[in-house]
Image (cartoon, helix red, strand yellow):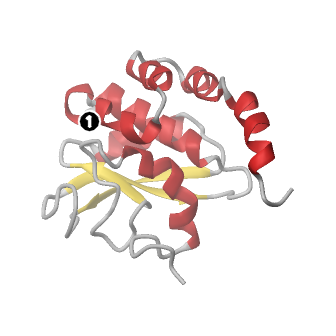
Amino acid sequence: TNPSPNMRSLTEATLYPGVGVLEFCAVSVGRGTGTPFEVIGAPYVDDLRLAGELNAAGLVGVRFVPVRFTPTASVFQGKECGGVQILVTDRERFRATDLGMLLASTLHRLHPGELKLEKMATLLGDEATLEAIRTGLPLAEIVKVRDAGMAGFLERRGRFLAYR
């Protein structure tokens, strides 16, 4: 059973935590295509350049293929978008949240006026991480900022886990 009409495969569920964090920004996350959350783009995006930049980052477990697509629903409905198709190459080593940070930082660096990065705040829920992306820190530094409170969170949540 699909958990959502827009999440119809294991790949889409794997990518969702990373790609989905950009849903409120001015970018299509593939809703209205046959592969939601497996493609991301916008009319202002150069698909070849974006794929090159993302692949050059060397994120483990994922590769990016340039693609053009036209969503039939949601953001940029009926408009041709340049972007990337995201291919998971190693699901065990892949970290979707790192993908989200890489997508946000790369798209913001390439298209700061169009992406509307500030809209990511609602889903991201961490102003320090958003500021790290906004100021152009390298991915490793953004991840450090994002994960700064992780140990405390894991400790606090422990007593609420039903299964250990």
Relative to 29, is 140 above or below?
above
Check the image and name the residue furthest to the left. 78
Vertical side of 144 occupied by 59: above or below: below
Residue at the (41%, 35%) spot, across then down? 104
As drawn, 70 above or below 66: below
* Horizontal and vertical percent position of residue 7: 46, 70
Place residue 81 in its image quadrant: bottom left
- Residue in front for this viewpoint, 143 or 93: 143
Q: Residue at x 78, y 59 (%)?
A: 162
Q: Measuring 58% from the left and 60% from the top, which residue is drawn there?
A: 14
Q: Position of residue 61 (x, y in %)?
A: 65, 50
In the rendered image, which quarter contains the N terminus? Answer: bottom right
Give coordinates of residue 42: x percent, y percent. Answer: 24, 48
Q: Secondary structure at mark 1?
A: helix
Q: Is residue 71 left or right of residue 117?
A: left
Q: Residue furthest right?
A: 164
Q: Which residue is mark 1?
A: 115
Which is more toward the observer, 97 or 108?
97
Q: Nearer the viewer, residue 33 or 149?
A: 149
Q: Amino acid at mark 1?
A: Leu
